[in-house]
Amino acid sequence: MKAAIYHRYGGPEVLSLGDVNQPEPGDDELLIETHAAEVTKADCEMRRFSFPVKWFWLPLRFAIGLLRPRRAILGGYFSGVVVTVGKNVSRFRPGDAIFGTTKLRFGAHGEFLCLPQHYTLENKPDNISFEEAAAVPLGGLNAIHFMRKAGLQPGESILINGAGGSIGTFALQIAKLMGAEVTAVDHGDKADMLRGIGADHVIDYMREDFTRLDRTYDVIFDMVATSSYSGCVGRLKPGGRYLIGNPRVADMLRSLVTPLMSDKQVYFEFAGEGQAELHDLAQMLKAGEIRPVVDRVYPLEQIADAHRRVETEARLGIVVVSLKA
């Protein structure tokens, strides 16, 4: 089968299209023909082995590959069609259109993949394309986790820092569904897109630093790893909640102290990417309550260009590769 592969760490140029063996499903697994997959920051970080959170560098290096990557195919979020199922599989049947996450197996940037039936997988809603479905799991699962963790109430205000990315675009829409007033922070080029999916206010971080403005919020959801911890906490209303999507070790330690010294709460808990949350997202998609914001769709042959697009941060939404282009 065809797949985007890499055998050494480095820039997008280390990626190439190659032939690899097609996987065979076990008794509890599905064989899935991949139609589309998201290209994420995590794919780019894995490819070059560079992560914003540095404290787990060494154990991760051993797990992923000390000198070269152990797994040649990236891609953790996908959509596709079930081809065959193992004898113990009861959740899905051949011909089912599904979407979901490969967890740490990766492999979605290849024509076929095998996954256990207990993984976070869901039937694709009929009203979205395979490309749109592939753009849902990463952003949607993380966004629904954090918005529910925030306990947003109707009429409360939330600022989303990094609102134009995979997670931010879904967090914005889910926050609006929960009745919140949303301020989105990102590059000014994304302002129209952000307003189009419901942002009440947009701040261009190139022109203004929201931590220095005289505005406060009930919730701040922060996806930017270099943000000022004290600046964000300082922009919370009494009893406010600060949710950190890309925490540094110092942020984790300070999050333990802040609730002891004030009435503000800080959370950095990572999303479990659970089945119940993906099911809820599918229902929202079917109802037209949320939609994935797809920036560009690349054919798999242009996987290096897709990685470059993600790394430039110029994208207006989510980058997807199509294996059926």
Image (cartoon, rainbow, N blue to C red):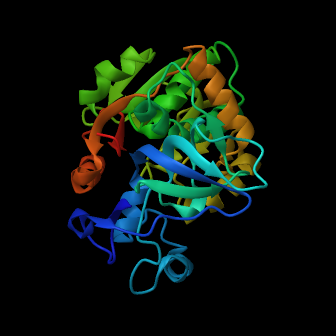
The answer to which image quadrant residue 11 occupies is bottom left
- Residue 57: tell me if it is visible: yes
**Is residue 241 in view from this perspective?**
no
177 to 117, vertically: above or below: above
For residue 104, side relative to residue 207 (left or right)? right
Residue 133: give x, y in percent of width and height.
49, 33
Q: Nearer the viewer, residue 36 or 180?
A: 36
Q: Residue at x 57, y 22 (%)?
A: 285
Relative to 207, is 229 on the left or the right?
right
The residue lying toward the viewer, choosing from 247 and 68, is: 68
Q: Which quarter of the image is occupied by the C terminus?
A: top left
Residue 306: x and y in percent read: 27, 49
In the current view of this chain or complex, which residue is farthest to the bottom?
67
| Residue 264 place in picture, x, y as percent | 69, 39
Residue at 55% in and 40% down: 137
Which residue occupies the foreground of this view, 215 or 80? 80
Where's residue 188, x and y in %? 26, 28
191 over 254 or under it: above or below: above
Q: Quadrant of residue 221?
A: top right
Residue at image position (33%, 22%) is 193
Classify residue 145 by image quadrant: top right
Q: In which quarter of the image is the N terminus?
A: bottom left
| Left or right: where 5 falls relative to 154 | left
